[in-house]
Image (cartoon, rainbow, N blue to C red):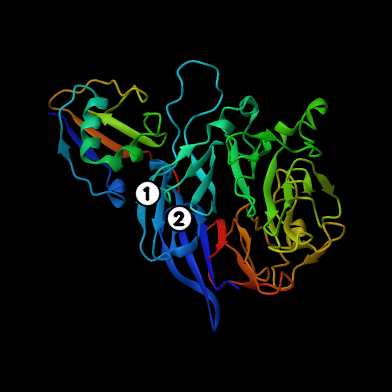
């Protein structure tokens, strides 16, 4: 199963740890995570379901392409990494 | 008179108390997080809106007067209809103002949505009657990419009567609790627009709109092009040309019981946005805008580049204490209607909003 990891910055607001979930796409895997962590959804996605402007998601070391429908494929051994863009001050 | 102030800043919420030695910071909440709007309330129910930047807009509530806070639901748009030519994002990028009428809480947002909560921020509903007006398609960003609904004036005599202000988009009035709206703004003018559109109510960049609580038909407006006053609840406006030392600014404070008395914080217009001659000053009228006095005792008069944002100026319910915070973290409190000011002994982050508790 894909493993999902989060930036430490998010742990400032939510109690998170790496988890393994089922899912063949980024969207499907994250949906499983959000079932366990309902508050997390609004931190990662906006109300239209798109990845927030200043959040980045990597799969296997590459940024995902589809930030709106989250249709990038993930394999069983992939790690999905959710991090914030390095902006702000 | 209120002995407590909440100050929302770029780096947290500051709880200020007045003690024998004077005003000082008592507690800091959300240190490091931008606080864009605060709403003190009765029964120690307080709300605070945060803009976490990376992670979006969040709403926190306290039921014990600001001691303990818990996260609640932030206002959010429904799914944007696919296709179509709607020019606006259907996402809440910040909560810019919250106001209360009994058990109802209203929130104005960037990019333009008005939301209502009947359960202290546990759930929110987009006010479709305003959002679906054809005029909304013409709203624009004013200093930001997206339009901003920043002012919500609710008639204390009848909370179904409301006026909202949008930068840019003008003012809109509802007589039925938000079920229907009509544009107000007759008499406002926009120098930045093409000549044929200068008087268009939908093109007006109102910076802040505040009604007098005791006489809510009287409304004061700091507009991009000057100061205006309405005596018919915002439908028509008269320009107040006596304002000095300049007619540009953002912040407005209106006396709670005297509709003739209001305060402004003028700045050099448009792109510069610093105090005139780099000297902090507050302009006050006590005669409906026929004349103003410039109040500066206790305010920095040399090399002061503080801008006071639209929500960073407040007056207490007694009409005696005024407080304002600036973009460079300056903070001043007056206990005599602005005649003299004292600086808070703190160096705050940039101040977004100020509310007396």
The residue that appears at 51% across and 29% down in the rendered structure is B89
Taking depth in this image into account, of A77 and B229 the one nearest to the observer is B229
Side of A63 relative to B91 (left or right): left
* CA distance for labels 2 and 1: 9 Å
Disc 1: host chain: B
Q: Please tell me how crowded label 1 is: few (under 14), some (14-19), or many (20+) other residues with Cα within 10 Å.
A: some
- Residue B257 locus on image (x, y percent): 71, 64
Taking depth in this image into account, of A65 and B39 the one nearest to the observer is B39
Q: Quadrant of residue B82?
A: top left
From the image, tell me which residue sits under label 2.
B47
**SS for callout 1:** strand
**SS for callout 2:** strand
Q: How many marks?
A: 2
Taking depth in this image into account, of B351 and B97 the one nearest to the observer is B97
> Are the residues at dot 2 and dot 1 in contact (C-beta closer than 8 Å)?
yes
The residue that appears at 62% across and 53% down in the rendered structure is B309
From the image, tell me which residue sits under label 1.
B72
- Find residue A65 and name its label: none
Taking depth in this image into account, of B247 and B302 the one nearest to the observer is B247
């Amino acid at each position: 199963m894909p493993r999902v990891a989060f930036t430490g910055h998010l742990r400032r607001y939510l109690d998170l740890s790496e988890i393994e979930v089922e899912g063949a796409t980024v969207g499907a895997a994250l949906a499983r995570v959000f079932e366990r962590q309902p508050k997390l959804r609004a931190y990662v996605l906006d109300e239209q379901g798109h990845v927030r402007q200043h959040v980045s998601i990597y799969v296997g070391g590459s940024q995902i392409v589809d930030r709106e429908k989250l249709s990038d494929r993930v394999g069983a051994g992939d790690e999905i990494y959710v991090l914030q863009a390095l902006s702000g001050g | 008179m209120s002995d407590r102030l909440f100050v929302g800043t770029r780096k947290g919420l500051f709880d200020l108390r007045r003690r024998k030695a004077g005003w000082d910071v008592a507690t800091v909440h959300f240190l490091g997080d931008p606080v864009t709007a605060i709403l003190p309330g009765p029964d120690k129910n307080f709300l605070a809106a945060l803009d976490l930047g990376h992670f979006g807009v969040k709403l926190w509530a306290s039921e014990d007067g600001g001691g303990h806070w818990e996260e609640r639901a932030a206002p959010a748009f429904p799914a944007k209809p696919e296709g179509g030519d709607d020019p606006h994002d259907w996402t809440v990028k910040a909560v810019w103002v919250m106001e209360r009428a009994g058990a109802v809480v209203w929130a104005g947002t960037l990019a333009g949505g008005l939301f209502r909560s009947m359960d202290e921020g546990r759930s929110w509903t987009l006010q479709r009657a305003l959002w679906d007006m054809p005029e909304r398609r013409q709203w624009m960003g004013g200093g930001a990419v997206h339009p901003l609904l920043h002012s919500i004036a609710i008639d204390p005599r009848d909370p179904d009567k409301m006026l909202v202000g949008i930068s840019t988009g003008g003012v809109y009035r509802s007589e039925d609790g938000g079920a229907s709206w009509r544009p107000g703004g007759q008499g406002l003018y926009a120098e930045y627009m093409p000549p044929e559109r200068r008087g268009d109510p939908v093109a007006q960049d109102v910076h802040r709109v505040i009604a007098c609580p005791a006489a809510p038909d009287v409304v004061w407006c700091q507009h991009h092009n000057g100061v205006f006053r309405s005596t018919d609840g915002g439908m028509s406006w008269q320009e107040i040309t006596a304002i000095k030392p300049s007619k540009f600014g953002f912040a407005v404070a209106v006396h709670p019981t005297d509709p003739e008395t209001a305060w402004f914080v003028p700045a050099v217009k448009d792109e510069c946005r610093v105090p005139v001659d780099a000297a902090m000053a507050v302009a006050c009228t006590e005669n409906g805008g026929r004349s103003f006095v410039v109040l500066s005792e206790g305010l920095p008069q040399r090399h002061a580049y503080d801008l006071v944002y639209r929500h960073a100026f407040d007056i207490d319910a007694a009409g005696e204490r005024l407080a304002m915070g600036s973009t460079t973290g300056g903070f001043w409190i007056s206990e005599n209607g602005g005649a003299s000011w004292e600086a808070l002994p703190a160096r705050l982050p940039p101040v977004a909003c100020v509310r007396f508790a």
